[in-house]
Each structure stands twice: as structure tokens, then as C-alpha cells.
Amino acid sequence: MVALTSFPAPSELIRHKEGDTVVNIDGTGYGNGTLYITETVVAWQNVEGKGFSLNYPKISLHALSRDTSAFPQECLYLMVEGKLPDEADPSERQDSEEEEEEDQSQVITEIRFVPSDKTSLEVLFSSMSDCQALHPDEQDTDSEAEEEEEMAYYEGSEGYDHLTQQGQATLQHLENLLISGQGDGQVPNGTNVTSEQFEDADEMDQ
């Protein structure tokens, strides 16, 4: 069972608030409450002030589910990375803490929000989509940064004249090492470099 905790209801950056919404986590219902879709978190809270909140980077997928053969009611479906805190005994939780941390990347939690007003499902989905877009995937961002870094030496098409000042300095340094016999014909990334390559660059420069 998921442990519902007490916390103040979100009051800022709310994109949509939907009352009378039942939540189902991994096939278990947790009653009726209010769903908050904010720019920072998705939170659900029952009338007792207990519930849970989710950070957008942990939400790997959200969609409208209208297939009643998969779930008896139309809902907003979320697939969340990791496991929500459970009601296990604190000592047992401590003993298995390291094991759980290792397994978190492989665990997926399914959450379904079922509003009593089914016409609000489209609004829930679009609000979540807008907020999710504010939190791009870090891996995608890192990949783009790596690609930009790899292209940092080049400003345009091939040729020495199209290298940046840093690229020209690096190329000149490597050429000097080869001429003096100090270079081993390898640049840091393991690419073979020959004097003919530099001659070609010089010809292009002319």
C-alpha cells in the first residue's frame, strides 16, 4: 500500500484543479480527492489533507485512457518512474533501502486519475502536457549539449578558414607536434592524423 502523507495543498502556479477525482495506483483505489496540476508538480489530496505529489521528470508518460476493457473507467493515465513510498515497517524499509535504490530505475508505477466529470479529461491532459513541456528530459538536453560541443570547432563548411580561433590553434598545435616528431599521430579522441591532412588544409587555405 502507498503511504499517503499530509502536506499543504498547492496554491501557486496552478494550471488546473479538479475536485471529486478518484485515484488508482497499481490497481488499488485510494478514494476521492482533489487533483492539482501545477507548473512544478502533479498532486492529489483527499479530504483529510493526505495524498502525494509527483515531480514532472519522474513522469515518463501521460495519456487519456478511454479503453474500458483495460480499466473500467475513462481516466488520465500516468506512468511514473520508481516506486511511491509505501507503508512498510520503518525497520524493514531501512534494511532494504539500498536494494530499492538499485531497483528504482527498473520499477514503473501506474497511476490513474478518474474525475467524476469526464468532460474535464481533455483539459487535464492538455494542462499536463503544457506543464510537462516546462521540464525537458535532462538526457535529451545533455545529448544536445554534447553535439554542440563536438561542433564547437567548426563554424561552417569544411576548410581551415571555417574553423574557429580555438579550432585553428588546436590544428596548428597538432601540426607542429607532427613536424617536430613529438606527436604520436593521435588526437585525444583516438582519430589518426597524418601530415597529408594538414597539407590539404593548407592548400584550402590558399
Image (tube, helix red, strand yellow):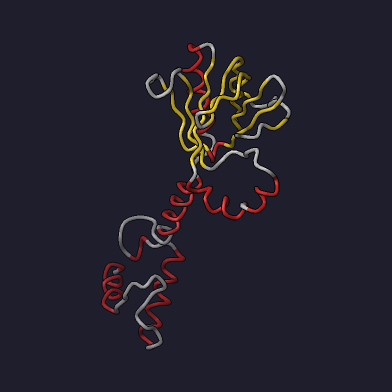
- Residue 104: % across, % down: 53, 48
Most foreground residue, 148 or 32: 32
- Residue 121 at what x, y percent from top left? 48, 17
Camera-nearest residue between 104 and 87: 87
Q: Looking at this view, is 55 or 173 the one in front?
A: 55
In terms of depth relative to the viewer, which is nearer, 187 or 170?
187
**Which residue is pictured at 49% across the width and 28% down the height?**
129
- Identify the residue at horizontal 57%, vertical 20% (top origin): 22
Residue at 61%, 32% (x, y): give it.
41
Residue 10 percent location from the top left of the image: 68, 26
Residue 120 in the image, given as x and y percentages of width and height: 51, 14
Instruction: Name which quarter of the figure residue 43 lies in.
Output: top right
Which quarter of the rendered picture does the C terminus lie within?
bottom left
Query: Along the horizontal axis of the image, is 191 left or right of 78?
Result: left
Counting every numbered tag in the picture gives 0
Q: Residue furthest bottom?
A: 181
Say above or below: 147 vs 90: below
**In the picture, which quadrant includes the N terminus?**
top right
